[in-house]
Amino acid sequence: LLRTSRLAAARGGATLAARRPLSSAASGSPDAINYTYTTEFDFRRAESLPVREAFSIVGKDGKLRDGAKEPNLGPELLDKMYRNMVQLQVMDHVLYEAQRQGRISFYMQTNGEEGINIGSAAALETRDTVFAQYREAGVLLWRGWTLQNFADQCFSNKDDPGCGRQMPIHYGSKELNFHTISSPLATQIPQAAGAAYAVKDEGENGAVVATFFGEGAASEGDFHAGMNFATTLECPILFICRNNQYAISTPIQDQFRGDGIVSRAAGYGMASIRVDGNDILAVYEGISQARKFARANSRPVLVELMSYRIGHHSTSDDSTAYRPLEEIESWRTTEHPIPRMRTYLEDRDMWDQEREDKLREEARKAVLSAMQVAEDKGKPEALENLFADVYQDLTPNLVEQQEELKEMMRLYPKHYTTEY
């Protein structure tokens, strides 16, 4: 940090210490943090603080909220956003059923969170690096990852970029600036802060970094480390929290007592906004404005997107064991982002039932076709790929291990096979 500060000063820029908002004083001095004194005892209870409102444009009925400004997005963009939401929903349904049929080992849906996926993706630029959790397939879909790409990864075939070494839905694309998903929660958050530190000197027209996570992941230590790194190092990054109200089976009232996740931003000196995650237009506007702020000021922003996980956590979960069906059905029928967006478009003569039926039929056929092609492809070369892609060239100890495994397979062919 000292070296970075000196370099900035030598280039005529502000040092890190001079740019910090709390004080211009040296660290450790009496006035390092600005505050005043009082003789009145001021014991503040958390519940006495106001609850943060969620920014929203379109209500659950698909109509503009009173006082909301009509978004100026254009018919082509609105059409693409809706089509991507439907395509994502259809893909989720087909691949979920494929897992139930035993054709793939695992799957996770975005049911109820399609507006978060597509609204965020549309507001970001493809050059913005994304560190996702595991419910952001729509971001890749928007950026151009094909249905065949999704199917190949889920079936772990020879065209799977991960060579079959990852679970299904652990997507990644270097070309689309989407880091490969890892299973452990929140590990992507401090990694994203580091990536944002690397692009902070690109100026106002540079890229930003976006990291996605659920409200449950915000209980991990990596969340706090990433937030603190980003604020103290002044990084252009969006911390995008999908608050879908459940961390697997744990409801939010058993996760924390504060005002959601957005309230934590103030403690780190971070800008923040809460958005109606079921309103794709509000998501788009919220992420757009957050991106502009982050890049123009080289500062992080926490965006809490309020939604509800309508589907099970994954194919390994039965959510009816810990929440009533009436609750799920209520959210599905009254708050789902897809019907809300459809009503908005129909009111403006931009959509109708004929187009809806055609889109869903074509989307289903496209997913089924991609899935069939993926299923018929061969598997990756197991023995070579087992040791590849950690180092550019295999290290001597890995070469030794590889040869040892080959010999073991030669001696005991009945117990080792790479055939499928």
Image (cartoon, rainbow, N blue to C red):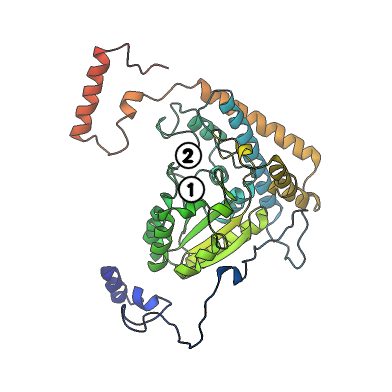
- State which quadrant residue 352 falls in: top right
Who is closer to the viewer here, 307 or 156?
Answer: 307
> Residue 168 at x, y = what percent?
49, 33
Residue 417 drawn above or below residue 173: above
Who is closer to the viewer here, 218 or 145?
Answer: 218
Q: Tell me the number on the disc at residue 292.
A: none
Q: Amino acid at mark 2?
A: Tyr
According to the picture, the residue beneath numbered tag 1 turns out to be: 132
Position of the N terminus by quadrant? bottom left
Does dot 2 land on a helix, a strand or a loop? Answer: loop
In the displayed image of the protein, which residue is found farthest to the top? Answer: 414
- State which quadrant residue 37 falls in: bottom left
> Is 44 situated left or right of 23 in this image?
right
Q: Amino acid at mark 1?
A: Ala
The residue under the point 39% across, 32% down is: 165
Residue 195 drawn above or below residue 268: above
> Residue 191 at x, y = what percent?
39, 53
> Residue 192 at x, y = what percent?
42, 54
Q: Are marks 2 and 1 in contact (CB under 8 Å)?
A: yes
Q: Tell me the number on the disc at residue 171.
A: 2
The local crowd at label 1, few if under 14, some if 14 to 19, many if 20 or more residues have their Cα within 10 Å, is many
Position of the C terminus by quadrant? top left
The residue under the point 62% across, 57% down is: 284
Who is closer to the viewer here, 39 or 412?
Answer: 39
